[in-house]
Amino acid sequence: MSSHAEEPTRRDFLTIAGTAFAAVGGAMALWPFIAQMNPDASTQALASVEIDLTPVKAGQAITVMWRGKPVFIRNRTPEEIEKAAATPVGELPDPESDLQRVKKGRENWLVLVGICTHLGCIPKGQSLADMKGDYGGWFCPCHGSHYDLSGRIRKGPAPRNLEVPAYEFVEDTKIRIG
Ligand code: FES
């Protein structure tokens, strides 16, 4: 394989992690002042991160840390969205439509807490070279849970879909989680 093939994998991880870290760093600098004024506000500041999604191209995924948990952000391709949306909800162990798990008009962005709902492992599927399971999303090798392109459990012991954290778009390609 040429070095070109490896490039997207590496890029997936570093750019956004840097941005998220900077945002949290800024919040921490405010800590002593806010803590004196209002403990709730200080907790809130630390509890959210802003992520610039501009570098994440279609088909790529990145992982950011939020409240000590990995959050998977995937920029889904039109084919992936179509596949996720076409899945009959009645066939799902934890029935949720794809639209219930994304923001309307921005269906390409899938944001998930990257923790298996079985016993808490971190599923594979973020890197291009990772196993993605039978449904093209994520695969938890601990006990074999397969998640689909919407992060929904499809096969294996996990009881629930991967959690979608509270988040919002603050700009066209920027989200705030928490
Ligand atoms: S922790 Fe993921 S399958 Fe058991």
Image (cartoon, rainbow, N blue to C red):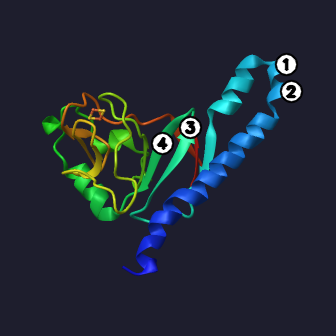
Residue at 38% x, 63% y is 59
The residue at which mark 4 appears reads as 71
Question: At 34% across and 48% down in the image, what residue appears?
Answer: 124
As drawn, 81 above or below 44:
below
On the image, the x and y values in percent for residue 13 come to: 52, 57
Contact between labelled residues 1 and 3, with CB atoms less than 8 Å apart: no
- Real-space Cα distance between discs 3 and 4? 7 Å
Judging by the rendered image, the residue that carries numbered circle 3 is 66
State yes or no: discs 2 and 3 in contact (Cβ < 8 Å): no
Badge 3 local density, few (<14 within 10 Å), some, or many (20+)? many
**In the rendered image, which residue does mark 2 sit on?**
33
Going from N to C along the chain, the mark reached first, 2 or 4, is: 2
Look at mark 1 in the image and give the residue it sits on.
36
Asked if residue 38 is positioned above or below residue 29 in the image, the reply reads above
What amino acid type is highlighted by mark number 3?
A: Trp
Pick out the residue farthest to the bottom. 2
- Decide: few, some or many residues near mark 4? Use Cα within 10 Å; few <14, some 14-19, many ≥20: many
Residues at marks 2 and 4, CA–CA distance in whole angstroms: 29 Å
